[in-house]
Amino acid sequence: MSNKVRVRFAPSPTGGLHLGGVRTVLYNYLFARHHGGDFVLRIEDTDQNRFVPGAEDYILECLHWCGMQPDESPVIGGPYAPYRQSERKSSYRAYAEKLVEEGHAYYAFDTPEELDEMRARFKSEQNPSPQYDHHLREKMRNSLTLGDDEVTRLISEGVPYVIRIKMPDHETVQFTDMIRGEVSFNTATVDDKVLLKNDGMPTYHLAVVVDDYTMKITHAFRGEEWLPSAPVHILLWKYLGWMDSMPKWAHLPLILKPDGNGKLSKRDGDRLGFPVFAMNWTDPRTNDFTQGFRERGFMPEAFVNMLAMLGWNDGSGQELFTMEELIARFSMDRVHKGGAKFDFEKAKWFNHEWIKKSPAERLLPDVKTILAENNISITDDRYLLQVIDMVKERCTLLTDFYAQSKFFFETPAAIDTENIRPKWSPDKESFFIGLQDILATLPEFTATAIETAFKELATARNIKVGELQLPFRIMLVGGKFGPAVFDIAATIGKSQTLLRIRNGLSQLA
């Protein structure tokens, strides 16, 4: 085995990328970078019936958005190309045939109808879902039950067949999982999985073993739902004579529903109103649309940080990590065995913290895009940078920047007079009429100068400053929100401040 760490993320191009899938990428990526190794993207597209156009590009864009660039991939290439299993199709048959020759696999000629009949015929209370296993293989049409001449004839006549692994009757298969420790299986509970389909394509079971071997993968991390496949894969490594090269395995804990009751699914997100995919995805077959974290307003830094903490921590209590810090601290022995409950409020907390700690320059492109989507075009980046710094603490999602900052770019058409009227009076109206004259003559229109003039006039008119600031804010902003009111006035400038006071007075008249 190579001394250099080599890990792979091997998704099927069948749809959007679920939170759990992105976390699998992330743990692979962090492990590889921590050890100075290679991170390989391999597309497992052997199931052509489930292939979805556009899904591979979507996966690549997700990785790019999250900042996890592979070292080798179908796009970049690399020393072990090709990186799409469909393009490696011709390489798998020889391994499957070798397994047949050595008695570890066999040809099965059963038709779909015969398989359905088998499931119906052998169904019982004790065995509600009969499988093609060591009990039933002797009752089916395969090279274990047919004579050699018959097998040769069927193959030469082009009769469709698959190649199945011949699972031992009662053998214990075990391995050491980097998260779970010693794991063992009784082979009697595992059916004879198909290794090579009748179209010559390998199934996942054969392809993953052959590819991990030929691509010199040293560590394989995948979701715990793949644990039941482990005995098949281990036996394939053994039967092909590659046990010394078998990667170290880790089966990652599930991401659970918020109540902890079962694996988080897209349906849960739809039901509870939060995304479960990294980015927007529209299924081209059904037109079924699923919103993603990116479009909901998440920063990739926050998304990655949140995912890292769903099943791992470094023991320090720290929660906010940059990618560089995650790479430096990450280790598989700190990954939890149990599932991690997904909490959307906590996810938003991560995003809020990241927005607050990010410099305005980092947020500028995203905020510009969000404002443009709301018909606000920015011509002065310096002005927008100033606005971002003023409102970012009030933004949980990037999409919040529109509501929190639009009044810096547009005069509010209507203001929330309902929150002014209960305490409005002729004295206050007179105050704002007088304030216009004072502000119009201020030589420097700074927040300090505006505040001083405002408070001096309030004292002279014998009105509490606190009772005047809310109407002033609503006149400038349109509602009861926004940063410090005198900072707002200084930022929008003298002419806009005076215009908005006039508008406010006319709406209150």
Image (spheres, helix red, strand yellow):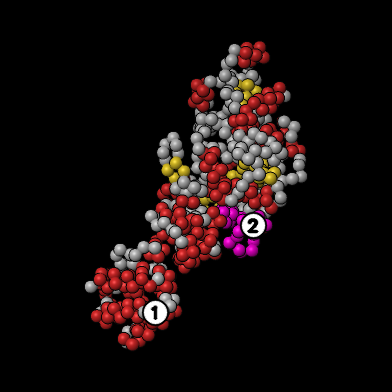
Camera-side residue of 180 and 22: 22
Distance, label 1 to label 2, CA atoms, is: 49 Å
Residue 187: where, in percent of width, then height? 65, 34
Residue 203 appears in view: no
Camera-side residue of 128 and 239: 239
Camera-side residue of 27 and 420: 420
Q: Give the number of the mark in front: 1 or 2.
A: 1
Q: Relative to 426, is 213 on the left or the right?
A: right
Name the amino acid type tagged 1. Leu
| Residue 299 covered by magenta stretch | no
| Label 1 or label 2, whichever comes before in sequence order | 2
Q: Residue at x 32, y 79 (%)?
A: 437
| Secondary element at tag 1 | loop
Residue 435 to residue 88: above or below: below
Choose top left, top right, bottom left or bottom right for residue 195: top right
Residue 235: where, in percent of width, then height? 69, 34
Q: Relative to 497, is 343 on the left or the right?
A: right
Q: Which residue is mark 1?
A: 442
Q: Residue at x 63, y 53 (%)?
A: 335
Circle number at residue 324: 2
Residue 110 appears in view: yes
Residue 331 to residue 246: above or below: below
Q: Residue at x 63, y 36 (%)?
A: 83
Residue 130: where, in percent of width, then height? 54, 29
Q: Relative to 428, is 124 on the left or the right?
A: right
| Residue 307 covered by magenta stretch | yes
Magenta segment range?
A: 303-328
Residue 244: where, in percent of width, then height? 76, 38
Residue 199 to residue 416: above or below: above
Q: Residues within 10 Å of mark 1 (few under 14, many from 20)?
A: few
Q: Residue furthest left?
A: 509
